[in-house]
Image (tube, grey):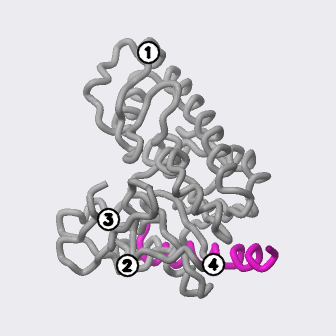
Amino acid sequence: MKQEAIETGDLSYSPCRYGASRMLFRGPRRRLDRPYMAFIGGTETYGKFIEKPFPVLVEKAMRQTCVNFGCVNGGIDVFVNDPTIMEICNGADITVVQVMGANNLSNRFYSVHPRRNDRFLKASTVLQAIYHDVDFSQFSFTRHMLGDLHAKSLERFDTVVEELRQAWVARMRNMLGQIGPRSILLWFSEEEMNDLHWSERAGQLQSDPLFITASMIDELRPLVMDVVQANPSAESLGEGTAGMFFPPSQEAAASEMLGAACHVDASAALIPSIRENLYSL
């Protein structure tokens, strides 16, 4: 992954590596020879354009080292296939796992880049047979590809969504098994956690975490200490990009992300669960 940098110089992500992992994570690098908590997830956990993302806010409130393994546009694959990160998370007092979408992971229908999981690599022969009328060589990103498949056929697209959901639950079971029982799932989204059909959600293919339902989360509850739902308040959502740091060229991208006030809401939702479960260990 290329070093994340803000052109204005107002915000530095201090990229760093841990052990043998090939991934660059947000720094400064934290020490692992004393008690720590780990955070894994996508763009929100990383805190792109955010000076103090929720892992930093939790660290300040709990007065315990928090290691940020967030990955911009990351999916489950970037973590579950990284033995170094899985070992570090297994050694943490608590690991907070942000619920990531089902679109950015390799499955029976298509494969993604092992580290940049939003990158579409290739379609399987099965998917090519289902969508014989699609030229998959034109796609570079999973969401673009899925958008075109959706436009071609809703009936066929439901088959794809079901495969992605099954792959997601299986991959999450694998990852949580490697992390161990001291983990908390975090649903951090403007969307409510529910069982609505994906087409009934306000954002449809723009919803995050994409294709994940409350029933899928329920399947994982026995593997974790808690599930925390952090839906930012209307007031926090109304803050927009206030408190975010980005160059003018990235204003449109920043406006689509959860802002600084939303991260305060996420930390406020997380901290009571972390305190309760940390002190019960």
Residue 214 against residue 181 in the figure, above or below:
above
Image quadrant holding the C terminus, namely bottom right
Q: Which label number is shown at residue 125?
A: 1
Q: Judging from the image, what secondary structure is the residue with disc 1 in?
A: helix
**Image x and y of residue 219, in percent:** 74, 45
**Image x and y of residue 187, in percent:** 60, 60
Q: Does 228 lie within the magenta span?
A: no
Q: Residues within 10 Å of mark 3 (few under 14, many from 20)?
A: many
- 4 or 1: mark nearer the eye: 4
Spatial separation of the CA atoms under disc 1 and disc 2: 44 Å
Residue type highlighted by circle 4: Pro
- 3 or 4: mark nearer the eye: 4
As rendered, which of 125 and 207 lies closer to the eye?
A: 125
| Left or right: where 75 falls relative to 192 | left
* Residue under numbered circle 4: 35
Spatial separation of the CA atoms under disc 3 and disc 4: 34 Å
* Residue under numbered circle 3: 254
Residue type highlighted by circle 2: Glu
**Image x and y of residue 120, in percent:** 36, 35
Q: Which residues are magenta?
A: 258-281
* Residue under numbered circle 2: 51
Spatial separation of the CA atoms under disc 4 and disc 2: 24 Å
Residue 229's image quarter?
Answer: bottom right
Q: Judging from the image, what secondary structure is the residue with disc 3 in?
A: helix
